[in-house]
Image (cartoon, coloured by chain):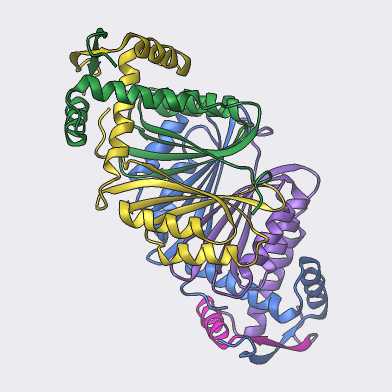
Chain colours: A yellow, B green, C blue, D purple
């Protein structure tokens, strides 16, 4: 795809919203308004598509926990091995003597990914958990 | 919002992305493209205005990109090395022949983390980027 | 397997070698000579088995390079994506402004793993590369 | 080595491991088990005597273990958190329902790194462990 192969169309936006958006785009580092809008469209499509359970997604599950809490790590590892085909790998960062940050890279059907994320986040001892959904890249043009 | 008080401007978007976006907007129930874009702008502003101050955070930056796009990887690595003291490590997953999923584990002052995330997500060739903020665990009891 | 299910046999070793070995085992932290010998046996089996090309192995490829060297990162990523089914994931650590440490977790037939390792290690700009072979765990009792 | 000047002692090894070792020793061409064990001891001493001093190194520690073995994971995590300033991050790959591959990226004084590696590899339940030393890149030109 040549980068100058674009469709041109016009949009009507309330003036105050437009100027606020332009300021945000400038602050974020976008070279022009169209690039900022194209990026928003892609993000919106990623969010929209994860609602369908059968969709293939990639993503991360981020967990913070205190590894001194009895059995928390055993529980988390057991859940992960039960779904080892959906978990590409897990990155573990030792934040301090107590706290662990664990990031799981996951890939598979949206509804299965959500199920694992829920199981992990409700596990006793987990301070904070978050599922971040992104795309496998295949269905998103640029 | 009064519909006749609007600014009219033109936007250039790759045709495939535009048609995917239009389909999504229709499915969601938007009456026209401008209303869908205005809504996205508002959501984006809410995110952008989240306060990122001097507090210490831990988190991840998730990026999906096509490594065949000229210079995208060089650009991303340069940005990362400029801030190597804030990036604990980066996990790279080769999704397929084209697409890469990269997860950066970051730690430091919130506003600096936000700045790196913006720089990376705006980089040309990045299909989707997301900053996920979590805690360093210290200030969160369980 | 119960841990006290062991075979007992006797070994004849030159006295000086034995006392040096015992000192090493103590320094390393082994509780007794048998545990140290069992660990050596497992390591020796892992090394022995990697000689056969069709054997499934797991391992890591460790690379240190200067990402400012023209095209080094593009070259490394291209090689990795050509074999993305053998590479589980890659961990990238930004050592300083120039130097990168990259650890690839690999899994597959020994001879294919060796081929990728060779391609990566000879790539221009790589300062140091090393293939570390371990086991998939399946064929190693404890 | 004079063969009659030997110390005789008894060793206890799990039966399956012993028979695998014997098969390997036969394939390699050893006349008896004692000669194979003596050779392993010498190799192990050479490795052990490598000098690990005050110099800064980067490297990886690779571990394979069965996470179902009682307390193995707790033990490994405790050791890691005791030295969290030397461990950049840990990548965990779920090989199958039982086996885990863990790669620690480490950085710091050589002798401290060696000490952690020994502690981890000796831990009960670890099937195979290996320390791979590389450079921080600073002292190696290209």
Asked if residue A119 is positioned above or below residue C137 in the image, the reply reads above
Residue C23 spot, x, y in % from top left: 82, 71
Q: Is residue D100 left or right of residue A69?
A: left
User: In this view of the protein, can residue B88 be seen by the observer?
Assistant: no
Residue C90 spot, x, y in % from top left: 47, 45
Q: Quadrant of residue B35?
A: top left
Residue A83 spot, x, y in % from top left: 40, 63
Range drawn in magenta: D7-28
Total labels: the figure holds: 0
Asked if residue B68 is positioned above or below residue B102 in the image, the reply reads above
Can you say which quadrant of the picture contains the C terminus of chain C?
bottom right
Q: Quadrant of residue D127?
A: bottom right
Can you say which quadrant of the picture contains the N terminus of chain C?
bottom right
Comparing B4 with B74, the one in front is B4
As drawn, the residue found furthest toward the front would be: B2
Comparing A80 with A20, the one in front is A20
Comparing C46 with B86, the one in front is B86
**For the point 70% across and 54% down, which residue is it?**
D81
Comparing C66 with B100, the one in front is B100
Question: Is residue B67 found inside the magenta-colored segment of the image?
Answer: no
**For the point 70% across and 75% down, which residue is it?**
C36
Question: Is residue D21 found inside the magenta-colored segment of the image?
Answer: yes
Residue C120 spot, x, y in % from top left: 46, 42
Q: Is residue D48 left or right of residue A86?
A: right
Magenta stretch, main secondary structure, is: helix
User: In this view of the protein, can residue A42 be seen by the observer?
Assistant: yes
Asked if residue B49 is positioned above or below residue C62 in the image, the reply reads above
């Amino acid at each position: 795809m040549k980068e100058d192969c674009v469709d041109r169309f016009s949009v009507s936006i309330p003036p105050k919203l437009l100027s606020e958006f332009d300021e945000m785009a400038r602050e974020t580092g976008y070279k022009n308004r169209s690039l900022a809008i194209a990026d928003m469209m892609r993000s919106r499509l990623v969010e929209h598509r994860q609602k369908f359970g059968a969709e293939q997604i990639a993503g991360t599950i981020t967990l913070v926990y205190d590894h001194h809490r009895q059995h928390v790590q055993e529980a988390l590892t057991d859940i992960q091995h039960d779904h080892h085909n959906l978990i590409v790998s897990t990155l573990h960062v030792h934040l301090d003597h107590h706290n662990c940050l664990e990031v799981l890279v996951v890939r598979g059907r949206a509804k299965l990914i959500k199920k694992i994320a829920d199981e992990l986040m409700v596990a006793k001892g987990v301070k904070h958990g978050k599922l971040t959904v992104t795309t496998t890249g295949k269905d998103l043009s640029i």
